[in-house]
Amino acid sequence: MSAHAPTGLETILTRADGGVLHATFDAPPINLIGPELVRDLVELMRILDTTSEFGAVVFDSADPDFFMPHVDLTKVAEYTAEAAKAGGPGDASLGMLFQRLSRLPVVTIGKLRGRARGAGSEFLLACDVRFASRERAVLSQPEVGFGASPGAGGVQRLARLMGAGRALEVLLSADDYCAELAERYGWINRAVPDAELDAFVDRFAHRVVRFPADAVTSIKSAVARATAPADDELRAAAVLFQHFVREGAVGPRTALLFERGLQTRGATELGLGEVLATLPSDRSHSRT
């Protein structure tokens, strides 16, 4: 019997291909992580946690310029409330939602074209493997440029993948990184020529789902035990991020970015790494 793709999701298009589910983010204008997208992620993860129809899920974007650029900074409370529905009020954060993603019984594959910054990068980091278009992929953890620290696992997962020095370079620069450098640093598994990316990911996904599911799940769990951040680390990161949003420099710096077109389809979002470096220096919030 053929697998059936979940239906009824507002911001995620789904397509079943044998034992592989394709989940495509489609939340115009630029795939911001807001309450609707988080609500759909919670529901999709609930389905994937309870069905045996799929052995792998491939996450990609309908927008070639934006995978997930970052959270919707006008709706932090709303998307946090949606994230809480995955695990309860004590786990009301994207970090814990992405932790649940990392523990799904299916193999999770990120296929990246466009920009994955902030929580978009952190979503990919919670996937089991990540493949990116050599020509079209851009990754960044820009939080320090806003006056915050990553709140959904970026610090914890990048440090484990890259080592301290490279993780600090990424986290403190708030700059945009191309796929080739991201591959060299360990942020992604491979940078693949854009024309070959779809076929490459399809081959990998279908190869994985041909193997016995219990063996695949056992390997996933063993790797997670050896490498995944602890829940308490992610909870603490979320608390710190929310503190910076409420009380730090995030408010005034974000206001400047909104004046320049943040969260619209324009030069600020396309070149955010460069734009952050042009904001006025402000040391008044340098101690917390």
Image: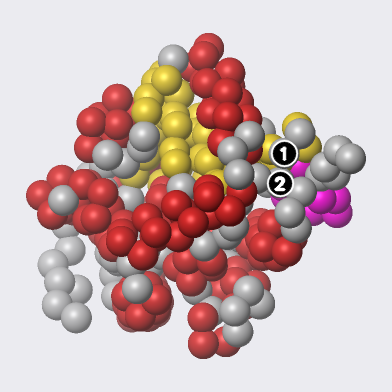
Q: Which residue is mark 1?
A: 19
- Whether the magenta-drawn stretch holds residue 285 is answered as no
114 w.r.t. 121: above or below? above
Q: Secondary structure at mark 2?
A: loop
Q: Amino acid at mark 1?
A: Gly
Give, as a single range, the part of the protein colored magenta. Answer: 6-15
> Residue 110 at x, y = what percent?
51, 40
Tell me the quarter of the picture where residue 23 sits: top right
* Residue depicted at x 41% and y 50%: 125
Q: Are marks 1 and 2 in contact (CB under 8 Å)?
A: yes
Left or right relative to 16: residue 142: left
> Residue 86 at x, y = what percent?
63, 74
Q: Which residue is mark 2?
A: 54
Q: Residues within 10 Å of mark 1 (few under 14, many from 20)?
A: many
248 w.r.t. 116: above or below? below
210 w.r.t. 226: above or below? above
200 or 141, nearer to the observer = 200
Left or right relative to 225: residue 147: left
Quadrant showing the N terminus: top right
Q: Amino acid at mark 2?
A: Phe
> Residue 188 at x, y = what percent?
36, 37
